[in-house]
Image (cartoon, rainbow, N blue to C red):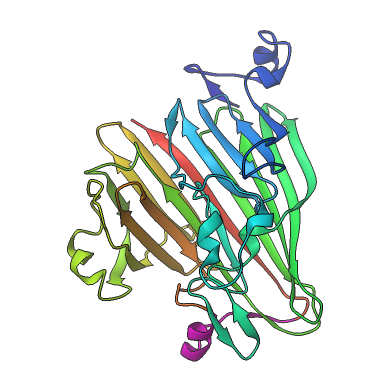
Amino acid sequence: MPSLFNKNWTRAELLRYIGDIRQLAEVRLCELIDGPGRGVRLAEFKTGSGFAFTVLLDRGLDIHEANYKGVPLAWQSAGDITSPSSYEPEGTGWLRNFHGGWLNTCGLTNVGSPGRDELGDYGLHGRVSNLPVQLLRCGGRWHGDEYELCLEAVLRETSVFGFNLQLTRRLTTRLGESALQIVDTIENLGDREAPFMLLYHCNFGFPLLAEGSRLVMKSKASRPRDEAAQPGLATHLVMDSPQAGYAEQVFFHEMIPAADGFATAMLVNDSLQLAGYVSYRQKELPELIQWKQMGSGTYVLGIEPANCLVMGLDAARKRGTLRMLAPGDTCETLLRLGVFEG
């Protein structure tokens, strides 16, 4: 039963007041018609609670903007949305069309640093965020007194003589809610085992991210990625004001899950009385990476559940931590993104 306007509503009660449920909640398909993102298909969600977000159908089902009662939650890069035709897979070319967004999916065969191994060159953070999808279902339906909005789509990362991985994503939210859920199923459709690296790059920005905002979570231990992050370890949970020339700091966290197996990290802004969170099933995503980038003009906190670290494919193979999918194998992950008020 949805909770809206300080009241719980049955379906029958609510429909007495409106002629079309889309007055309150909907998912709308549209397309950009100008600029570097021309032709990119969008799915725009609103839930009636003041929570709204935009999914990029031609950019790996990434979530670009998200807001709650007019307050932006997500960081957006200076590059904004670009067409996947602008993607430069070599080296760090991924950064040229990194739109930021509330969720940027990284993988499926590399996460992190670019490099080269016996299989050839691979670029920063992989190809999945620059792949268009085939839409399977998009819309809303009543389930008793609950109204669910759903988008389901599939994409494939493959090449002739290469690997053949398929990702099927089901994204859902409901009338009156201020959160969404993503269930991803990754399957190896090829005839040989394939490397499988996956990271959910969840990016929070101003004004939720501001001086004094706090990252709140339960962890066993935290460690810096490198020497650049070492000086910031003592204060990595508290956000700074934007600084010119800031060098990114990355930290790795060993999270403590709740009884249901989910781990949660939350960015809290006390002055706004708002908190944005990322919650994920830890069994399939054992790593949590924090990207603290307090730069002037590039001001973002990344909360990144993953099945790997971010040093790249070859480094994971040498450490013996590289996840492989055998032919026919599947992996299902579950992620939730949302906002709390008060």
Answer with left or right where residue 108 lies relative to residue 240: right
Instruction: Give the quarter of the figure containing the C terminus.
Output: top left
**Rendered residue at 47%/44% (across/down):** 76
Q: Which residues are magenta?
A: 313-326
Magenta-span inclusion, residue 316: yes
**Rendered residue at 72%/54% (across/down):** 132
Image spot of residue 49 (x, y percent): 52, 25
The reply to whether residue 101 is visible in this rendering is yes
**Rendered residue at 68%/41% (across/down):** 38
Question: Would you place residue 323 above or below residue 333 in this image?
Answer: below
Question: Would you place residue 223 above or below residue 60 in this image?
Answer: below
Residues 181 and 108: in front is 108
Answer with left or right where residue 172 lies relative to residue 267: right
Image spot of residue 39 (x, y percent): 72, 42
Instruction: Give the quarter of the figure containing the N terminus.
Output: top right
Magenta-span inclusion, residue 85: no
Image spot of residue 208 (x, y percent): 35, 38
